[in-house]
């Protein structure tokens, strides 16, 4: 007893939890929808009896009641049978079959009772059949809710009870012959979301399938033993079984067809109901003052929650319960729309400022175009930042930008000074107040502005050893832009590079490798790297060869390429990571060899490149032209017979830098050491000078 008492509480709790029936799980949505469709067919003016109206007719004669029942819907007859025991007895009596039959005949789409066959002579009553179609979904064994009704066995039975009692089983491949000789069960259960349960799986009764299988086995054994008439008996058995089973299986198929057609109508009504609910929710939000576009865009988040509201109308009480669930989505969409519209407005303001900035650049000397700040830097100037980010929703106009553009020259000057100070701070050595390359990532990008009182000394930016680079140029080997920026002359124009707007710490970096190469080149020119400027090296215009490069065969010669000092620095930077270029090693060509190289070099920058402009007017502001076009323009428009480069016309250094030219070659195997004294020509090796003399001079050669 004590052990039983100890187990009793747990058993009670287990039973309560395990066998609790949820009333919602017993809902027969198929019956509800049939009733709903039937009620819609009744005209609105027809008398609708109130609750309890059946009581006065309880004393009516039975024959009269049967006459009345003939005109009712079968689902109404089923509900009347559930009212009390008297009506249930009345509608289950054999005399009621005529009323039931006429009620089903008046609604031809409803499936009738399963047919009676010789092997299955038991006839299901009309009330039992109506209960299978319209009854509550409660397992007849365990009492659980939501069991699918098996229309032809006939029983409400959950899956657990079905498999536990071996009452039904799936038709498997081992019973292929028997499968066609047994009744197929059909589960008809319409789920609330509009899906039919178990419309694909066909089930049969285990005991029936086993009996048929045993009979087939017996006939097959008899045939194998060659008993007389065994095959004919087997064929007769199969024909008799099919004659008994086929009408029932056809009836199962008709039930499934009816349920499928009903499901389509149910889904259509459900979608219309949900659409109406969504429209009512949208209307409610619009009346609360939300923008129609926000309400429409939030519908995709509202619609999934509406699936659970299976009601034709949205009452005030339901709305108050649903509003806290839906309103955050509408508010979020509203914030996204406002942010998007705000972004569009700010972009329009930036475009307007950009256009005015273009007009401003036309008013300044063209030689300064390359050193003006980029448009995204102008957006960050305080006067323009206030205009662009103004809280109002109005677009900008010329009148509203006049005060800001009056401050633009001062803002450009301050920006230029700040950038120069930043570059100076990157240079190594205490003399420039900078840091080494390993320290340049610190606070150099946030230098003090133009208001600092320390005297500015930008002479270091003119040195030939002040080499900078843009880290964006190291992304791809094909990109040479910004690898070698010597001094402010090259670094200033590259500050307009678009990658510096958001990447690489928004600044240029000191290039230690380029600094080392430039130092060696300046020393070869017998100058002091601490004082030699880039202009000094340009005036000397020496030519160098890289002794780290191997002698190779090129088109027309065997030797090495020759470089001016700027191209030599770029060459060494580009060879970073190659073992043979671990340190800069150069040889300075003689004056004669340098002159020979210059005669064969291409013009730098390219004269055919469309990057030339007039320096006296903004004619070529939007469309740069080749050098010859720029010279022709200066001659015709400004009446200058002999235009001077960098005074009357110039090459505009864009943020993409100039196009690298091909290097001239210096022959070294054999070396070119001879020049013809009769004509001005390039250097030749011994073989080449003899060929030249034979061709152009005296016959003995």
Image (cartoon, grey):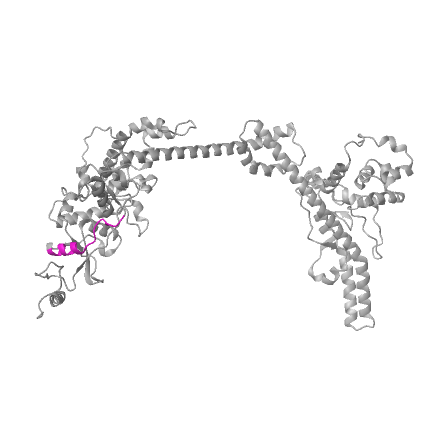
Residue 314 falls left or right of residue 438: right
Nearer to us in this view, 416 or 598? 598
Image quadrant in which you'd find residue 280:
top right
The picture places residue 303, in percent across and down from the top left corner, at 59, 38
Query: For the image shown, how many numbered marks are present on the structure?
Result: 0
Image quadrant in which you'd find residue 295:
top right
Q: Residue at x 44, y 32 (%)?
A: 342
Residue 398 falls left or right of residue 625: right
Q: Which image quarter is the N terminus in?
A: top right
Which residues make up the magenta segment?
Answer: 592-609
Q: Is 232 above or below relative to 608? A: below
Task: Report if residue 604 lies within the magenta region.
Answer: yes
Nearer to us in this view, 179 or 417? 417
Kindly tell me whether residue 465 is visible in this rendering: yes
Q: Residue at x 74, y 42 (%)?
A: 138
Residue 547 falls left or right of residue 334: left
The picture places residue 648, in percent across and down from the top left corner, at 20, 41
Task: Report if residue 27 lies within the magenta region.
Answer: no
The picture places residue 246, in percent across and down from the top left corner, at 78, 57
Nearer to us in this view, 426 or 332? 332
Residue 85 falls left or right of residue 18: right
The picture places residue 99, in percent across and down from the top left corner, at 86, 42
């Amino acid at each position: 007893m004590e052990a039983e008492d100890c187990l009793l509480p747990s058993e009670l709790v287990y039973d309560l939890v395990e066998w609790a029936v949820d009333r919602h799980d017993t809902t027969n949505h198929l019956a509800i929808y049939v009733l709903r469709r039937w009620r819609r067919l009744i005209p609105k003016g027809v008398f609708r009896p109130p609750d309890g109206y059946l009581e006065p007719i309880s004393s009516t004669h039975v024959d009269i009641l049967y006459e009345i029942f003939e005109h009712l819907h079968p689902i109404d007859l089923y509900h009347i049978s559930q009212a009390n025991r008297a009506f249930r007895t009345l509608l289950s009596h054999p005399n009621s079959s005529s009323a039931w039959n006429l009620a089903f005949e008046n609604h031809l789409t409803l499936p009738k009772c399963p047919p009676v066959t010789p092997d299955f002579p038991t006839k299901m009553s009309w009330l039992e059949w109506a209960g299978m179609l319209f009854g509550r979904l409660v397992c007849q064994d365990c009492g659980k809710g939501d069991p699918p009704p098996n229309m032809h066995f006939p029983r409400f039975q959950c899956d657990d009870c079905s498999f536990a009692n071996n009452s039904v089983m799936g038709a498997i491949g081992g019973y292929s012959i028997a499968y066609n000789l047994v009744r197929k069960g059909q589960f008809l259960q319409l789920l609330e979301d509009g899906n039919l349960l178990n419309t694909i799986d066909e089930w049969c009764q285990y005991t029936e399938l086993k009996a048929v299988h045993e009979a087939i086995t017996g006939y097959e054994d008899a045939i194998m033993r060659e008993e007389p008439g065994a095959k004919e008996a087997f064929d007769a058995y199969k024909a008799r079984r099919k004659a008994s089973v086929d009408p029932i299986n056809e009836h199962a198929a008709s039930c499934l067809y009816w349920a499928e057609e009903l499901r389509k109508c149910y889904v259509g009504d459900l979608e219309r109901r949900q659409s109406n609910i969504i429209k009512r929710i949208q209307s409610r939000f619009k009346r609360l003052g939300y923008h129609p576009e926000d309400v429409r865009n939030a519908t995709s988040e509202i619609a999934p929650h509406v699936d659970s509201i299976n009601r034709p109308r949205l009452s005030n009480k339901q709305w108050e319960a649903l509003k806290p669930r839906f309103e955050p989505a509408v508010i979020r969409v509203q914030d996204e729309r406002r942010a998007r519209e705000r972004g569009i407005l700010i972009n329009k303001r930036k475009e307007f400022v950009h256009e005015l900035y273009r007009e401003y650049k036309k008013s300044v000397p063209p030689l300064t175009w390359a050193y003006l700040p980029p448009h995204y830097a102008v957006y960050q100037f305080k006067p323009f930042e206030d205009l662009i980010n103004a809280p109002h929703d109005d677009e900008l106009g010329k009148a509203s930008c006049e005060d800001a553009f009056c401050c633009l020259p001062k803002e450009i000057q301050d920006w230029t000074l700040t950038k120069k100070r930043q570059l100076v701070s990157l240079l190594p050595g205490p003399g420039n107040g900078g840091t080494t390359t390993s320290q340049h990532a610190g606070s150099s990008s946030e230098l003090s502005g133009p208001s600092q009182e320390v005297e500015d000394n930008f002479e270091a930016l003119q040195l030939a050893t002040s080499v900078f680079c843009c880290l964006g140029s190291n992304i791809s080997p094909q990109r040479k832009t910004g690898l070698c920026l010597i001094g402010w002359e090259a670094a200033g124009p590259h500050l307009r590079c678009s990658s510096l707007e958001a990447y690489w710490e928004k600044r240029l970096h000191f290039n230690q490798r380029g600094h080392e190469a430039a130092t060696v080149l300046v020393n070869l020119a017998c100058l002091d790297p601490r004082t030699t400027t880039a202009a000094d090296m340009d005036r000397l215009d020496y030519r160098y060869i890289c002794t780290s490069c191997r002698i190779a065969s090129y088109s027309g010669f065997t030797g090495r390429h020759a470089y001016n000092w700027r191209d030599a620095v770029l060459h060494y930077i580009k060879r970073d990571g190659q073992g043979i270029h671990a340190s800069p090693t150069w040889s300075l060509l003689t004056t004669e060899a340098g002159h020979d190289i210059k005669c064969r070099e291409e013009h730098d920058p390219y004269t055919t490149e469309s990057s030339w402009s007039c320096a006296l007017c903004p004619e070529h502001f939007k469309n740069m032209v080749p050098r010859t076009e720029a010279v022709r323009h200066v001659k015709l428009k400004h009446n200058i017979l002999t235009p001077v480069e960098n005074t009357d016309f110039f090459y505009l250094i864009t943020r993409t830098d100039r196009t690298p030219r091909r290097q001239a070659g210096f022959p070294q195997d054999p070396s070119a050491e001879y020049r013809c004294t009769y004509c001005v020509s390039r250097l030749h090796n011994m073989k080449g000078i003899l060929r030249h003399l034979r061709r152009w001079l005296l016959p003995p050669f």
